[in-house]
Image: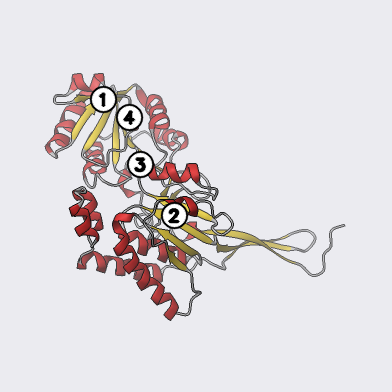
Amino acid sequence: KDVASAREKGLSGALIDRLTLNDKRIRQMADSLRQMARLEDPIGKVDKMRRRPNGLLIGKVIVPLGVIGIIYEARPNVTVDAAALCLKAGNATILRGGSEAIHSNICLADLLIKVIEEAELPRGSIQLIRTTDRNAVMEMLKLDEYIDVIIPRGGESLIRTVTENSTIPVIKHYKGVCHTYVDEEADLDMAEKIAFNAKVQRPGVCNAMETLLVDEKIAAQFLPGMIKKFQGAGVEVRGDEKTCKIAEGIKPATEEDWQTEYLDLILSVKVVKGIEAAIHHINRYGSHHSDAIVTENLRKSRKFLQEVDSAAVYVNASTRFTDGGEFGLGAEIGISTQKLHARGPMGVCELTSSKFIILGDGQIRE
């Protein structure tokens, strides 16, 4: 029904693809659930117990966040992944998916609700808002008495709407304006391989590279071949003035290009005056998601790691690895680009909090 409706409305092929649930994708969702079931349960773990001079034993125990509201766009698989991850971490979940996927979301949520009832888990552990009325989202964002945190997953417009209207704490999964900086001391064969993978392997995801920065000392040597390879793969290249002089077939980049998440075979390229200029550009225009340097210089590697203000910072590797599975965290609910409460891929452990536990034998404060 969702796919048929999308076709009738003339929605994009990319959106129709996200809505499509075939046998292969259903099996993938089932496999994902099995993997989550095998993850270690974080709840109840006691950490950092220490004895104070007065004899008190003080430590922390891992606890659920509580009730998590997930607001997301037309991706039916998120219904399953988000509900299962939250449940694994001991949380209740209220789901509100995109209207284009309403029929699939209802079907999948009903299956999950049936399973938790059969397992004698608390009723209401998984709930789905079943109306497509946009006002329901605004009402949900005011329920700070009942919902502990909101996690929006989707485009820039959705994130902004949720952030500006919520009275509930929000963990933002913002856009991915990811960079790769090729230093003058880079292995250029390695740099070409990394940059090509970061842009072309899967351009429509948040950890794909959107801007390539190249040191001016090796730009004339590196860029002509690199850009030709990109263009051969169907990438539209937009460059600054220096890039346009070095290579052919490039569109002039605008100020807007440097801060755009294309999610497509489009790449902006800039020639910079060394690592300081590269870091400045990334911190100014980036989205604090994932950024990489390619260099053989250890001092520059350390400088880049320390000064780039992003959730994931790489040395000599593709930004495409920013993913819960690739990081060994198991499934993820998204990539947090903020510093509170979690940062980077959010797996099961990132959906928890902690509380202090204090064990005594009659101590009183004098």
Disc 3: which residue:
176
Write the residue at 40% across / 61% down: 82
Which structural element holds mark 3? loop
Q: Position of residue 99 (x, y in %)?
A: 33, 55
Q: How far apart are the two marked residues, 2 and 3, measured between alpha carbons? A: 28 Å
Labelled pair 3, 4 in contact (Cβ < 8 Å): no
Please, is residue 166 above or below residue 259 in the view? below
| Amino acid type for the residue under numbered disc 1 | Ala
Labelled pair 2, 3 in contact (Cβ < 8 Å): no
| Amino acid type for the residue under numbered disc 3 | Gly
Nearer-N-terminus badge (3/4): 3
Disc 2: which residue:
136
Q: Position of residue 317 (x, y in %)?
A: 31, 43
The disc placed on residue 349 is none
Write the residue at 53% across / 46% down: 340
| Amino acid type for the residue under numbered disc 2 | Ala
